[in-house]
Amino acid sequence: MSVGVTGAGRRVAAPVALLQAMPLGLVLGVFLVVPIALLIVVSFFDYDSVQIIPGFVWTNYQDVLFSRVTWMIYLNTLKYTVIVWALTLFIGFWVAYVLGFLVQSKTLQMVLFLLCSIPFLTSNIIRMISWVPFLGRNGLINGLLLHLGVIRSPLEWLLFSDFAVVLAFVHLYTLFMVAPIFNTMMRIDRRLIEAAVDGGAGFWQVIANVIVPLCKPGIAIGSIFIVTLVMGDFITVRLMSGGQSASVGLMIYNQISLLQYPAACANAVVLLLTVLLMVGTILRLVDIRKEL
Amino acid sequence: MTETVPSQAKRGIGRRAALSLAGAAVGAGAVTGFPTIWAQNIKNVTLRQFGTGVSNINAIAEKCKADLGITLAMTALDSDAAAQKAVTQPKSYDIADIEYWICKKIFPVGTLQPMDVKKIKYYDKIVPIFTTGKLTPDTVIAQGTSPSTVGFVQGKTSTKFASAPTEWMTLIPTIYNADTLGIRPDLVGRPITNWKDLVDPAFKGKAAILNIPSIGIMDAAMVMESAGAIKYGDKGNMTRGEIDKTIAFLIEQKKAGQFRAFWKSFDESVNLMASGEVVIQSMWSPAVAAVRAKGIPCVFQPLKEGYRAWGGGLGIAKHLSGLELDAAYEYINWYLSGWVGAYLNRQGYYSAVIDTAKQFMSADEWGFWMEGKPAAKDILSPEGKVMEKAGAVRDGGSFYDRMGHVACWNSVMTEDRYMVQKWNEFIAA
């Protein structure tokens, strides 16, 4: 609504504005709109085991939407997304809180924030694989627990399980939650907190009534990162579940590797719509533009 | 074994001579003639090769450069990616190093050109598995995509496979082998003799199967048939009913917690085995060697029901012509002339022309790798690392013991699309 109004108000400057927007428009057009259009077109093609046959068939969508497997895989992917989102939100919020409010020195703040990002200097896959010797049947944790006499036989569920998948996701993606929340926390006017405290608010009241509401845009941005990353992931699920669990991304990856491009495209379109819907919901709940 | 092979070769010559006397003479002339004419130019040729098997071996590219002057630019891919590249980027390569079941999928698309057997110097010495399909005259051709069924096309421009050898070959065989289950003898605690041992409840949570649908389903089929749960018409080309049953069986096993993991790449299988996460699983021979190289016992266990075999070969891209095409033939002839064969045999694979490879191996190496004899001295890998100590005997024995007991070949099914859907169901279950 508000966009429409401002748009109408600036109509006079339209040609200049259009010109200014053109470079970005071109880049987005060539690298975003065209590929997605192709994706949609190919999703209606037919295929056999070696080639794609141009045409217009609904079979790819039928295979996606009316198969029990797809629903199960979507459910499984959503399960990962919800769990990972909740955990990263919790951890991310408190890490950001410590960085933003408890650490007083600006320098120390930045140093600690950079420390958080150090793991990102290595590749995703390396960070994931390094969990394997740690969690395995004869791995470090099992070795330690056995040695201490806490358990009698190795814990099997540590590796190649949903636990391992969620652990790796949280490890990989928490920073995507920390960064935007930290960013919004830094913009909170400290006088608001002082006022709340002066007004008699306790610690939890300040958190619940001042900090969390003002952090909403950061939380929303972090949530968008997490949702899109987890919904589209295939490699973490494959490596950490030992190939025993499936995700939508993995299903698409399998189809691509078997040259079933149209099926993969149909799947990708459905996934895209699902993720857009989720992102749309988040944006609906929180107006992130207000804070940017 | 040294007696059987020459007799095979002789029969081959007889058949070829009957095919076309004049043609053979011209062909022979061309093969010996052109290297001297083109020799200088060929040195400047670069052949771009991609693939799954020999494309992983840099030593071959180096030796090729030294012997022929031809530069090989190699790209290693997994089999799915290789099939994709062969079809979708036909201009991006000159030589395709692919497996026979991939060939069945992609040759009909027409991105590769058939090779004239008259220009293949050692054609008559190629192991008959790849020509007639019969290793020995009384061999029954195994189920699946037997290389001989997709090894030839009907003519120079044809993309239709021929049922018997013609003068136009699709792939020149390079590497092949017979696969079985790998086990940790120290951890299984009993002799392993059948494929069905993979689903023995004693190994609950300690078994693995590979997650490449077209190969994984074959291993599953070997297990099921071994357990007496089903008798397939052709394991390599199942009906929908057979696929349903096999997948249902796999899902049941998965739900019961039989499997620890499903692996997709070579190193995953090595790590699973070496770390003791898994004690019995589908495996490939170099992976077994890699586990052993870490000092961990691992056996590539021969099983009663036989092996699941696979084979790869080199194909020439459609767009090659003139000097580059000659260079490709030159490379392929060099490839079969022995040095590479010996190199591959020493890695535990088999080479397509075993006579020439023999000349490049010591009697002890030949005895160990090909004849199933105990090693007199330590057996070294091509890189010079000790692979087996003196006295060791190869798992499964001689070439004829192993390649003679192939139950099925890696394959691509008519119901491929359906099978993949069902396989996804298994992974998601």
Image: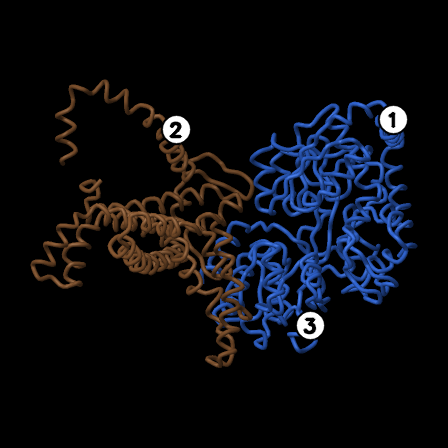
The reply to whether residue A63 is visible in this rendering is: no
User: What is the distance, in whole Å, between disc 3 and disc 2 at their CAs?
Assistant: 58 Å
Amino acid at pointer 1: Gly
Query: Is residue A101 found left or right of B170 in the rendered image?
Result: left
User: What is the distance, in whole Å, between disc 1 and disc 3 at their CAs?
Assistant: 54 Å
Viewer-nearest of discs 1 and 2: 2
Q: Which residue is mark 1?
A: B33
Asked if marks 1 and 3 touch (Cβ < 8 Å), the reply is no
Q: Which residue is mark 2?
A: A30
Q: Secondary structure at mark 2?
A: helix
Asked if marks 1 and 2 touch (Cβ < 8 Å), the reply is no
Query: Label 3 neighbourhood size at 10 Å, few (<14), some (14-19), many (20+)?
Result: some
Q: With respect to residue B56, does A140 lie above or below?
A: below
Number of callouts = 3
In the foreground, B410 or A33: A33
Amino acid at pointer 2: Val
- Measuring from the top left, give residue B258's x and y in whole percent: 53, 71
User: What is the distance, in whole Å, between disc 1 and disc 2 at their CAs?
Assistant: 53 Å
Task: Tell me the shade of chain B.
Answer: blue
Query: Is residue B190 found left or right of B38 in the rendered image?
Result: left
